[in-house]
Image: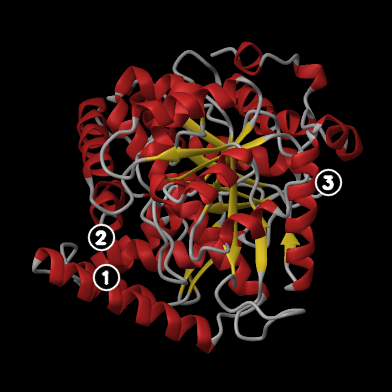
Amino acid sequence: MDLVTLAGLPSSELAPLPPGAVIAIDGPAGSGKSTTARYLANHFGLLYIDTGAMYRALTLAALRSGCDLQDGSALASLLADSRLDLVPGDGEATVRWNGLDVSSAIRTPEVEAAVSLVSSHAPVRVEMVRRQQEMGRRGGVVMEGRDIGSVVFPLATAKIFLSASLEARVQRRLRQYAQRGQELPAERIRDDLVARDKLDSEREASPLTISPDAIVIDSSAMNVRQQNEACARACRLNPTLDRTLDRDLAASRLELPWHYRLAFSVMKGLARFYGLRQVGNEGCALPRGCIVAVNHISLWDPPLVGSTFMRHRVNTLAKAELFRPRPMGTFFRWLDTIPIRRRGFDQEAFQAAAASLAAGNNLLIFPEGTRRPVGHPGPVRNGLGILVQNSGAPMQPVFIRGSYGRMPMGSTLSPLEVSYGPVVWWHGLPTLRKQLAPKEISRRIAGLCETIFKELQAESFARHPQTDFERDLGQRQIAHLEARSRKVFGHA
């Protein structure tokens, strides 16, 4: 795979990796993830976190203790009651389980054959993901596994899906075992890899998937050096694309029609009155033709989020019901709002949205489709995936918090904050189009967006812990939704 062709950029002009970068590498067993992850950690001066070793350590402990590998709750309890440490080294990380070095013991065929079953249990993955996110949120890490880019670090600086043919992976496994002084028949390794591929891809909890924004690299015909160098260049693609973003705020304002400048000024004054704090997006660096995807908790979300734009024309998808009173409909159309029917597929609205993006405008959408309980973002509907597939437009994820508890000059009930995540570039779409139906691709795009919302919320809670007001309000809203569902459908 020629990454230079994929990026449209010569290697010599690739931007450097930013400080505190997070690199996520996913792929099937035997694809060389660990080897490349260690190389990238050394190459960029980052910390390597071997997630596979974490699952192997739990598998080893379960085998030694006689814990039922089919019992996810028992395995999660075993993990919760134990201390699992990774100590970085020049080669493979030293793995300690309750202080005991198990680095060699976890690399046996017995552990290798059982680890996919252990890692398939949702309770196990929840606890492992929590530990991995704690390690990685400090930044400056390389992590590899099966769901790092899609679940653990949805905001990673670089996401790589490293694949290879089955035969190439068999040969790599043979060499790995030989280096450890172990000899296994090639047929056994092949059977184990096929079984692991099936289990990893079909498990209910965080299956092995290609994240829509991952750079896919097939290393079947590459040697180790070529694979490592290709992945090192891939890590610099997003920073390079981010460098192309237009940061000239003054020039972009001059291009705006007068009514946009007026609307943006009014919204900015409203945000200042309520003490809104903006996180990320320094310089308002939105690329032209970008889908701005925002979570939705209150009717105040559009003007408060809009106060952070201040550049480029913006079309907004809004429910058609808002346009029925003529004065309001005229006002929304004056602001280039596109009405959309929420029942069924509104082809006319999606065509107008795609035309807006093609013209270089930004498109503001609330992909959840309706207001959600505070503190509980998602689910995201498939409309976002339809727009992405039809337009190929990058996505700017935005998370708003506190629009319910707003007070003049700021509120202690719920901090008013608009958080920008990194721009999402859809590198993985060409590969997904070859493998999946459009509806499944839309589902994956929706799932990634929902995970991003949850991560942006987690980062906001880390800055300002969730308040009692937010927690109680969210629970009341959930109870209201459940009651309404029972009334309409007869169940929650």
Mark 1 → mark 2, Cα distance in angstroms: 9 Å
Q: Please say if the residues under marks 3 and 2 sit with CB atoms less than 8 Å apart.
A: no
Q: Residue at x 67, y 44 (%)?
A: 41
Of pointers 3 and 1, the one earlier in the residue sequence: 1
User: What residue did someone put label 2 on?
Assistant: 121
Residue found farthest to the front: 326
The kind of residue tagged 2 is His
Viewer-closest of 371 and 211:
371
- SS of the residue at dot 1? helix
User: What residue did someone put label 1 on?
Assistant: 75
Percent coordinates x, y for residue 159 in the rendering: 55, 38
Specify the label residue 426 is tagged with: none
Residue 2: image quadrant is top right
Mark 3 → mark 1, Cα distance in angstroms: 47 Å
Q: Residue at x 55, y 67 (%)?
A: 458
Quadrant (top left, top right, bottom left, bottom right) of the C terminus: bottom left
Q: Is residue 286 left or right of residue 249?
A: left
Q: Is residue 301 left or right of residue 201?
A: right
Residue 479: image quadrant is bottom left
Instruction: From this view, report whether residue 188 is shown above or below residue 142.
Output: above
Of pointers 3 and 2, the one earlier in the residue sequence: 2
Instruction: From this view, report whether residue 334 is shown above or below residue 479.
Output: above
Q: Please say if the residues under marks 1 and 2 sit with CB atoms less than 8 Å apart.
A: yes
Q: Is residue 35 left or right of residue 11?
A: left
Q: Please say if the residues under marks 3 and 1 sit with CB atoms less than 8 Å apart.
A: no
The kind of residue tagged 1 is Leu
Q: Residue at x 23, y 53 (%)?
A: 117
Viewer-closest of 361 and 293:
361
The kind of residue tagged 3 is Gly
Of pointers 1 and 2, the one earlier in the residue sequence: 1
